[in-house]
Image (cartoon, rainbow, N blue to C red):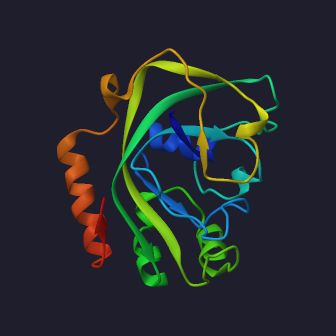
C-alpha cells in the first residue's frame, strides 16, 4: 500500500519547486506512544491545509483554504525519498538550517521545545529528501482514514504515475552538495 507523508500545502509547494529539501517534524498528536519517526524512506507528499500554516512560514504564495472534507479530491503531485534522517538536540544546528527551509524561527522553536506523546523537549526530527514530480498527479479521494493530526497515512491504491517514472525537482549535483552541507551541519547523522 502506498504511504503518504502529511505536510502543509505551502511546504509541499516549496518542496515541489526545489526551494526546500528538508522536512522538520516533531510529530502529530496521533503518533502513538513511541512518538514520531521518519518510519519510511519512500513516500508521497500529502498536502494538508489545516492549522494556521500560513502564519507559520516566512515565504510562499498561497490562499488560505479549509481542510479537506470526506469526498474531496486531493491532488498528489510529488514523491520523495529520504537520504538522511536524524534527531537534532542542539538548537544551534536548527539555526544553521535556516537558509534551507521556509518555516519561521518561532514555529521551529515551539516544536523543538514541545514535550509529550513520547517526544522529548529540546529535540526535533529532520530528514533530507529527494523530491520528484510525478509525470501524472494522483487524485486521492479524501476519506476519514486520512484525517487527523498524524504524519503518516496509508493511501488507497490508485492508478497513475509510479515514483520510478517521476522527475527529480533538483539536479543530482545540487542535491549531493546539499546533502554534504546538511550532513556537515549535523555531524552526527544516520543514513537510511
Q: Where is residue 150 in the image (x, y as percent from the top left)?
A: 67, 53
Viewer-side residue, 49 vs 144: 144
Q: Above or below — where is 66 with respect to 189? A: above
Position of 83 compared to 174: left or right? right
**Residue in view at x 69 percent, y 73 percent:** 117
**Residue in view at x 48 percent, y 15 percent:** 160
Position of 8 compared to 167: left or right? right
**Residue in view at x 51 percent, y 62 percent:** 24
Q: Where is residue 75 in the image (x, y as percent from the top left)?
A: 61, 25
Position of 166 compared to 47: left or right? left
Q: Where is residue 131 in the image (x, y as percent from the top left)?
A: 38, 40
- Residue 61: in sight, yes or no? no
Viewer-side residue, 60 vs 10: 10
- Residue 48: in sight, yes or no? yes
Viewer-side residue, 106 vs 136: 136
Q: Which part of the image, by quadrant, shows the C terminus?
A: bottom left
Q: Above or below — where is 57 with respect to 107? A: above
**Residue in view at x 62 percent, y 63 percent:** 27
Q: Position of residue 177 (x, y in %)?
A: 21, 56
Q: How many labels does the image show?
A: 0
Residue 111: which quarter of the image? bottom right
Amino acid at each position: 500500500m502506498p504511504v503518504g507523508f502529511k505536510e502543509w500545502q505551502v511546504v509541499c509547494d516549496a518542496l515541489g519547486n526545489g526551494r526546500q529539501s528538508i522536512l522538520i517534524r516533531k510529530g502529530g498528536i496521533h503518533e502513538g506512544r513511541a512518538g514520531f519517526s521518519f518510519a519510511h524512506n519512500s513516500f508521497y507528499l500529502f498536502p494538508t491545509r489545516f492549522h494556521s500554516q500560513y502564519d507559520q512560514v516566512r515565504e510562499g504564495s498561497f490562499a488560505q483554504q479549509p481542510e479537506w472534507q470526506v469526498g474531496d479530491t486531493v491532488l498528489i503531485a510529488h514523491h520523495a525519498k529520504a537520504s538522511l534522517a536524524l534527531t537534532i538536540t542542539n538548537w544551534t544546528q536548527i539555526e544553521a538550517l535556516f537558509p534551507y527551509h521556509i518555516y519561521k524561527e518561532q514555529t521551529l522553536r515551539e516544536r523543538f521545545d514541545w514535550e509529550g506523546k513520547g517526544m522529548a523537549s529540546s529535540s526535533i526530527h529532520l530528514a533530507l529528501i529527494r523530491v520528484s514530480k510525478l509525470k501524472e498527479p494522483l487524485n486521492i479521494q479524501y476519506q476519514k482514514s486520512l484525517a487527523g493530526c498524524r504524519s503518516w497515512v496509508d493511501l488507497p491504491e490508485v492508478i497513475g504515475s509510479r515514483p520510478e517514472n517521476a522527475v527529480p525537482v533538483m539536479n543530482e549535483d545540487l542535491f549531493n552538495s546539499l546533502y554534504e552541507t546538511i550532513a556537515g551541519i549535523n555531524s552526527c547523522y544516520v543514513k537510511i
